[in-house]
Image: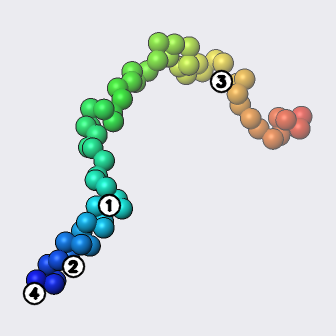
Amino acid sequence: MNQGLTREAAEAAVRRARFGRLPERIRFEDMAEQVEASPAGAVKASYNPEGQWQFYSCLALDLGL
């Protein structure tokens, strides 16, 4: 039974030598980044129904039909 413990201890020592220790934990606050939901220029990017025809894509209109 002593051989089993020494073999396990030897295997554990080999693992520690090979892999070292686990990396330190990263706190959630360090992982999360808080960003404003809408940037300062969001008014320009809002929906403009009068200007939407500029972005309208239709194959029939492209072909002049």
Reply above or below: 32 against 2.
Answer: above
Residue situated in front as seen by the camera: 38 or 53: 38
User: Can the viewer see residue 43 in this picture?
Assistant: no
The residue at which mark 2 appears reads as: 7
| Distance (Cα) linking label 3 and label 4 | 81 Å
> SS of the residue at dot 2?
helix
User: Can the viewer see residue 20 in this picture?
Assistant: yes
Dot 4 or dot 1: first in sequence order is: 4
Q: Is residue 25 left or right of residue 2?
A: right
Q: Are marks 4 and 2 in contact (CB under 8 Å)?
A: no
Residue 17 marker: 1
The residue at which mark 3 appears reads as: 52
> SS of the residue at dot 3?
helix
Q: Is residue 9 left or right of residue 17?
A: left
| Distance (Cα) linking label 2 and label 1 | 15 Å
- Check disc 2: other Cα within 10 Å, few if <14, some if 14-19, many if 20+: few
Which amino acid type is marked by label 3? Gln
Q: How many numbered discs, if any?
A: 4
Q: Is residue 56 left or right of residue 42?
A: right
- Check disc 1: other Cα within 10 Å, few if <14, some if 14-19, many if 20+: few
The residue at which mark 4 appears reads as: 1
Q: Are marks 3 and 1 in contact (CB under 8 Å)?
A: no
Which amino acid type is marked by label 4? Met
Which amino acid type is marked by label 2? Arg
Where residue 61 sits: x, y (%)? 82, 35
